[in-house]
Amino acid sequence: MSEEAVEGDTKSPKKKGTGLVVKAGIALTLLAIGGGAAYGLQLAGVFPGASHDQVEEDTNPKLVLKGEEDPYAFSSGEAGEKAIPDVPGEGGSKYRTSYFTFSDDFTSNLKDTTGLIQVSLAVATHRDGRVLMWLKKHELAVRSAVVVVLADTPEEEVLTPKGKERLQERLTKAINDVLIEAEGFGGIDAVYFRSLLVQ
């Protein structure tokens, strides 16, 4: 009996030691897999707190407060912008508004009619001067998009104030779509009619 007890005692510590090694190996493997998954999710942006090296800086045009210096401001006469001093008012938006005036009118047929529309347009942005630079740079594509919107406008729409407002919204979207496609960012807040003639 004593031999069996001794023999049984010697096997028991070996089994316990082997079991602990296997369990520790499994635990380390699971920990490594979990850590790798967490790191991958952090890089993908799922978890907040990515390091400064991994966070991309926002390089889009910034909103410009009234009275604030615009590092991308046009000099006098560039891109159709007139040199007007920025004197902040007390009311309205807290952001400065910059305007771009298209030098030539837009002329197009109206939808499902022989009528013509001729408009002179200006646009406004509260963003820095890069938006105006992009308008000048991509004016040909913008002009094309505006003509397409005008050609898809029914005559009865441009004869009412509400219809004109809807046309302004569609023109704003079309211009922003061109800028987004070309530069990755729109930035136009509104389109204004300088003149509008329907024949």
Image: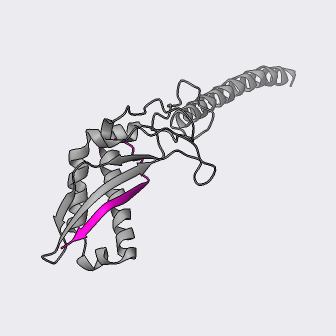
Q: Position of residue 48 (x, y in %)?
A: 62, 37
Residue 84 sits above or below residue 143 on the image: above
Left or right of residue 104, residue 82 in this image? right
Closer to the camera, 7 or 36?
Answer: 36
Residue 9 sits above or below residue 44 on the image: above
Residue 170 sits above or below residue 141 on the image: below
Q: Residue at x 52, y 42 (%)?
A: 63
Q: Residue furthest bottom?
A: 156
Residue 137 sits above or below residue 102 on the image: above
Quadrant where the C terminus sits is bottom left
Left or right of residue 7, residue 55 in this image? left
Quarter of the figure with residue 137: top left
Quarter of the figure with residue 121: bottom left
Magenta span has 198?
A: yes
Q: Position of residue 25 (x, y in %)?
A: 63, 26
Q: Position of residue 3 (x, y in %)?
A: 82, 20
Q: Residue at x 59, y 47 (%)?
A: 89
Q: Residue furthest right?
A: 2
Closer to the camera, 104 or 48?
Answer: 104
Q: Position of residue 125 (x, y in %)?
A: 44, 48
Total numbered labels: 0
Quadrant where the N terminus sits is top right
Span colored in magenta: 182-199
Q: Residue at x 64, y 49 (%)?
A: 90
